[in-house]
Every structure is written in C-alpha cells, then in structure tokens.
Amino acid sequence: MSKNKLADELSIAYKTEMNGYGFYKHAAEMTKDEHGKNVFNHLASEELEHIDVITGIIASLKGSGTWKGYKEAKEAGAVVRGTKALAIFPDENELIKKLKKNPSDEGAIAVAIESEEHAVAFYDRMLRDEAETPEQKVFLTNLLEMEKGHLKLLRWEHEALLKDGFWCDFMEFSVEKESR
C-alpha cells in the first residue's frame, strides 16, 4: 500500500479516535455513577494516546515518508497536539448524537460498545488487508489490542450495570496491563 493511501486510512482512524475522545469526555460528564465517570475518563485518556500515535505516524508518512515506532510516534504526536487545541464539536459527533437518544448510563455503555466494535473491525481490516511491513503490523496490532481491551472493559461494565443496577465498585484487573 502506498504511503499516501496508508496516511489517508490513518486519517480516518484519527477522526474516529477524536470522536471517541469527545464522546468519552461527554459520557463522563453525564454519567451519574462515579465509577462510570472514571471508566469513561480512562477511555478518553487512551483515545488521546491513540490520537497522538496516529498523528505522529501521519506526520512522519507525509514528511519523511518513514514509519515511526509506536513510542516515537506517540511522542511526536503529543508534541503536535501540544501546539494546538483539540477541535471537539459535540454537535457534529455521531456518537454523542446517538447518546442523546438515550441519555443514561446504559445508553452511554451501549454507544461505547458499538463504537469499540467498529474500531476493532477497522483496525483488524487494516492489519489483514493493508499492513505490509513488520512495523506496520506491530503498530496496528497494538491499536487493535487496545481497542479489544476497551471493548472487554465496556462489556464487563455493561454486564455489571444490567445485573446489579450499578457499576462495578472495583476493578478486578488493570486496563493498562490488559491493553498493552
């Protein structure tokens, strides 16, 4: 795949991660339960990491045409993000629009699960169909596994919410360890 085509695909991923970040921040604000707020804030921070990594890779592909490693791309993307404000437009965010149809903790979890399922499918397709080099495969595998970790966390929270009517009062695992 050409570097321009790959940069275009990653631009789609960037927009998706931006929408996810905006959604998770919004969901954290509207969720009633403190644990739920923490879960959404944690997911928002991971979306920021994805934004940084993707920004770093896109900048590298468009600049020198080279592929950076995950850590290098994250650092480069964080520098770029630090120079400008994140453009979050809630009225244009499809995830937030979906949440407005059912503005509840359950609605937030349902929208988040659907979003993460799409992210898993997107990165899985890119990994299978578009990644050519070992570096690209490692990078996309990292993102895919993180999205799978998000999905797992959200499904556990959904089960806890439906079964008991409240969020889990403690984490039985570390999201950071599970998603890396």
Image: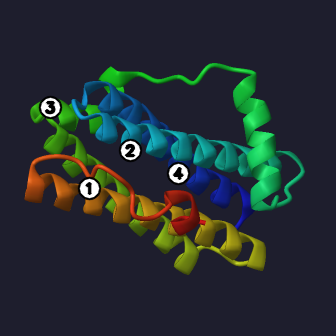
Mark 1 or mark 4: name the one nearer the start of the chain.
4
Local secondary structure at mark 1: helix
Q: Which residue is mark 3?
A: 103
Spatial separation of the CA atoms under disc 1 and disc 2: 9 Å
Q: Residue at x 15, y 45 (%)?
A: 106
Residue plotted at (86% across, 59% down): 66
Whichever of labels 4 and 3 marks the residue nearer the N terminus, that label is 4
Residue at disc 4, secondary structure: helix
Residues at marks 1 and 2 touching, judged by CB atoms closer than 8 Å: yes
Above or below, 130 relative to 85: below
> Residue 99: in sight, yes or no?
yes
Which of the two marks, 2 or 4, is nearer to us in this view? 2
Q: Which residue is mark 4?
A: 13
State which quadrant residue 9 falls in. Answer: bottom right
Residue 180, percent across and down? Answer: 61, 66
Q: Dot 2 corresponds to which residue? A: 39
Query: Would residue 151 appear left or right of 78 to someone viewing this image?
Result: left
Q: Amino acid at mark 2?
A: Val
**Is 177 above or below relative to 95?**
below
Of mark 2 and mark 3, the one earlier in the sequence is 2
Percent of width and height locating residue 71:
78, 55
Q: Earlier in the sequence, mark 2 or mark 4?
A: 4
Mark 3 residue crowding within 10 angstroms, few (<14) / some (14–19) / many (20+): some
Q: Looking at this view, is 39 or 173 the one in front?
A: 173
Q: CA distance from mark 4 to mark 3?
A: 26 Å
Residue 157 numbered tag: 1
Which numbered disc covers residue 97? none
Q: Residue 126 sits in which quadrant?
A: bottom right
Tell us which disc is closer to us: 4 or 3. Answer: 3
- Amino acid type of disc 3? Pro
Tell me the CA gap for discs 2 and 3.
Answer: 17 Å
